[in-house]
Amino acid sequence: MADRDIPKTMKALVKRDENDGYSYEDMPVPQPQGDEVLIKVDSVSICGSDINLYKWNDVARVIAKIPFVPGHECAGTVVKCGPEASIPIGSKVGVENHFFCGTCLQCKYEDRGICPTMGQFGHGKKTEHGGCSEYTIVSAKYLYIMKRNMSGDEIAMLEPLGVAHNAIENLEVKNEDVLVIGCGPVGLLAQLCVKALGGRRVIAADIDDRRLELATKLGADVVVNSGRENLKDFVYKFTNGVGIGRLCECSGASSMVNSSFSMLRKGGHIVMVGLPKEPLHVENVLTDIVFKALTLKTVHGRRVYHTWEKIEKLVADGIIDVSPIITHKYKMSEYEEAFKTLFSGKACKIVMDPSK
Ligand SMILES: [Zn+2]
Ligand SMILES: [Zn+2]
């Protein structure tokens, strides 16, 4: 796209006040400064956490700051670079929405993805920009430039897929049976990662039969409705009384997180991905935790940019197919309909096209 073809104004969703919902506005197309890059958004997907921002509840007050354009799962095409950025025009990019500082202890020695002072694209944290916008501005250092060919919708899926991959990579699943609790988008993507990283059988648990159906379609070996069946009893029957060796907690239901420790075998590994809203409480700390010599890992986001490289390859090589996860597509102008569908619980991943 030549500079003269970039319009002066664009459509965007904006959170301006604490009211429910967003406003759909005409805004000037921003000009990239310094190392910023202007991208045309090809696809933006809605995250479970976007429900908080839309409704503006207590969680939103912690994770976001008004005003902002929402949409942190964003794929785009580079159309213009600021004077200090040099990404080729036309590059397809994914946005690393954890805006790391680059200078702290974590950024220097551990992982930029867990920078303690990170900003958040699509949350109004250190940037008002987001993906629910025809064009958006991102510093070049927060862009992952795709080396392989894939669709905008697939690129938008890399943000949640990255969280799932980070969790499963930490869980060390090779030749292990893995229990995945919670079959929302990240739980389902985690199941795909288990298979991609050499895990043995996937046992998927959820309280919603529609989600379990999708888990089966994606290759889960066993599904358990943990609303109807006692999951712990099932796990001990399935493992001949030993307990499960690998557990990925994606439900974020505090009661599930609490009981998950009791399902692990001695020496088991657990990774926590879901976000419990209440304090955790474990009844038998000695027998369910200490004497088991467990490994507990938690993840927040992706390893920057290690995870991006891994998942780009898995999707481009066809080892992970994210398309069954995308159950609904909307024009951005139909965003109210899109959120209604999300609230109904019928959707897995919803993507929107900001150009329409
Ligand atoms: Zn997300
Ligand atoms: Zn940092």
Image: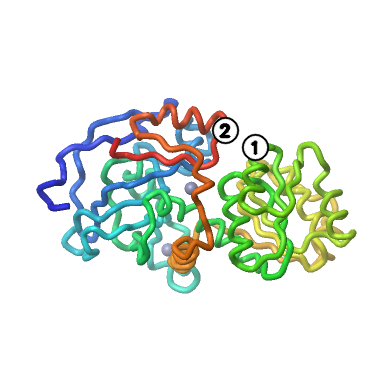
Q: Is residue 171 above or below residue 20?
A: below
- Relative placement, left or right, of 232 versus 348 is right
Return the residue nearer the eye: 353 or 123. 353
Q: Which label is found at residue 346?
A: 2
- Relative placement, left or right, of 190 versus 289 is left
Question: Outermost residue, bottom direction?
Answer: 109
Residue in the image at 78% along x and 68% along y: 267
Quarter of the rendering occupied by the C terminus: top left
Return the residue nearer the eye: 308 or 216. 216
Mark found first going from the N terminus, 2 or 1 = 1
Q: Quadrant of residue 138?
A: bottom left
SS category of the residue bearing label 2 = loop
Residue in the image at 31% along x and 29% along y: 24
Return the residue nearer the eye: 93 or 285. 93
Residue type at numbered disc 1: Arg
Question: Outermost residue, left direction?
Answer: 4
* Number of residues whose C-alpha sits closer than 10 Å to that of mark 2, classed few (under 14), some (14–19) or many (20 or more): few
Residue in the image at 32% along x and 39% along y: 354
At which x and y percent is residue 29? 20, 42
Return the residue nearer the eye: 305 or 190. 190
SS category of the residue bearing label 1 = helix
At which x and y percent is residue 280? 72, 47
Q: Which label is found at residue 210?
A: 1
Q: Quadrant of residue 330?
A: top left
Is disc 2 in contact with disc 1, using a CB cutoff of under 8 Å? yes
